[in-house]
Image (cartoon, rainbow, N blue to C red):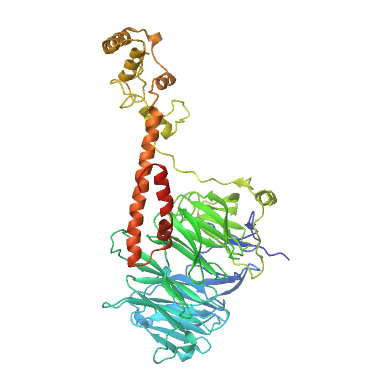
Amino acid sequence: MAATAKLVVRSSEGLSLYHGLVPPSPGPGLNNLPAGAVETSADGSLLAVLAQEGVAVYAAATESLVTELPGPLPGLLAAAFSPCGQYLQTYQRPAHGAGNAEKNLKLWDWRKGEAVLQLFQKTFSRDEWPAIQITHDGQLACQAVNGAINCYSLTDPAAGVVKRLTLKNVGGFALSPQAEGSTLLAAFVPEARGSPGFMAVWDVAAIGKGDNPPHLARRSFFRANSVRFMWNALGTAVLGLAISDEDKSGQSYYGEQHLHFLAADGSNDCLVPLPEGNVQDVAWNRRGTCFCVVAGHMPAKVQLFNQRCKMVADLGSGSFNIVRWSPQGTYLALAGFGNLPGDISFWHRKQDGRCDQLGKTRADLAVTCQWAPDGQHLLTSTVAPRMRVDNGFHIYNYWGELLHEQRFGMLLEATWLTAPEGAFPDQDPKPRSSVSSSQPAANGTAGRPAKPFQPAAGYVPPHVRGASGSGSSVPLAAAQERHERVGKFGPGHVRGLPPGAEALQTEANAGSKNARRRRTKKKGGDTATADAGDADGSEQASTTSGADLGTTEASITSSQPADTEDSSGTADAAKRGRNLQKKLRQIQQLKERQAQGGLDAEQQQKLAGEQDIIDELRSMGLKP
């Protein structure tokens, strides 16, 4: 039986489970179920539906209720499944004045309805949730406290803390996700009293209750208040996004960020070479063989690195701040949401490591995006409270074609459920025509090209816009050319005329004074005759009837000197020469820096182009 993709949709009307890819439709079981929030298990088989003071667990396959946690749970804020799906943790807002006696952080064996671990935590942060991290085998539960990371046995919860990693002022940690081998722990300790902060990796099996075991890998650095860890799926390397609240260079109001790479065996640690500016997003592919980084000032640069932190591909620049890998790890979507226009670019990474761009589109007002389980379709959603208007979700293929859209009065969440391993095998891209024709019609949108990239139009002054009622306007470049080609200061504007009105001209005063002099000389006249012609032309302009007035733009253009193009070409050549000489000076500065220290790849590329610049200067007759 073919696998079916399932989509969790939570709106103001309730929670529903949709079936299918294009178009998804509501299933027979879960339909408009009241829900304040929903959490899904890692394998997509379970849903935890949060109500005001309770949690209910549903099976995604049958869409039926499995169990409810004993309640009530007043002040319930969040819930999360363990990686193996056996445990469910909940956090409740502490009651005022209750103190440490109230255990508001609980770990449940939800099948038995028992709380196997109850702890106290004063504050709650979405960035640090889940607060309890559980090993992939479900044997240990770890929590960071002041000055240490405590590990509890889930096979014998009454034993209390069985392992402790003592780290003064520990700023965060993350367990490796690999399903085989020993679990590793990465932790961060911020700088203090002039000593640098560091991130390090330990083997959880080697941790005891006494002194800390030797770390497997470590990297030290300054300027970091917190670190967000990202393990690859193999557990062989971890990325640490170091975030500083203050940018000492003064270039950013929001602080600065640096991305650090650390191999789990200690064989490699380095600062990931990125352009200047903040890291917009970073993500490993599902196989754990490479990661993609979007970093730098807008338009941000997109780079691909392998699991040894060597750059293997440069995907250019764009208005992107989101990276999404397909579940199979071969397709990549780059998106720019939030304060960006919503551009999406689709890429395919081949087995040899090369990347090909497939399609692109623009998803206006989208807030987030997610690949479908088949790795062939991308879901974008516009949800509240981020956006209060035009709520709904859209489904695109990797060619950027809009296949389905569905509107809601208020959409709160739209998330694909993870499919079982192997349910949707990886597929190479299909030709664009076959992809469009194979999709069924959905609300009349199947195969319809989505909005292409549309650069923002430049400002066109009112007096050079088109006069048609449709509001059309001439291009800005054409309008500027029109106003710059007549006379030294443009065509001029007659006082007393409304903005945009054309001044009436006769043939006598259509050109500049110098042009009229040249025409007069050509007829055999002298300077005095030309001046007299000017005066006569002025009188004629004042006495000509209205039927003879108003020259066309073509006649104005014909009065231009013949050498305009030659002079502009000479100016362009001189400007080009100055730019080339400026690049040569920059290359000389890079050579001096190279003698003092290493250069990055982009700077090395500039050095390699020195001879080409010298040759071009010589061909222009200029001295290098």
Give whichever of 606, 117 is nearer the camera.
Answer: 606
Residue 260 point in image, percent of width and height? 41, 71
- Tell me: 231 left or right of 371: left
**Quarter residue 248 falls in:** bottom left
**Quarter residue 97 falls in:** bottom left
> Number of callouts in the render?
0
| Residue extending farthest right | 1
Give whichever of 386, 365 is nearer the camera.
Answer: 365
As drawn, 478 above or below 413 = above
Residue at the location (48% across, 29% down)? 470
Give whichever of 379, 507 is nearer the camera.
Answer: 507
Can I make out residue 210 in this image? Answer: yes
Residue 258 point in image, percent of width and height? 38, 67
- Tell me: 165 left or right of 534: right
Residue 559 point in image, percent of width and height? 39, 20
- Tell me: 396 left or right of 265: right
Residue 611 point in image, percent of width and height? 42, 53
Residue at the location (36% across, 24% down)? 486
As drawn, 195 above or below 433 = below
Can I make out residue 15 in this image? Answer: no
User: In the picture, which quadrant includes the N terminus?
Assistant: bottom right
- Tell me: 484 left or right of 393: left
Give whichever of 63, 253 is nearer the camera.
Answer: 253
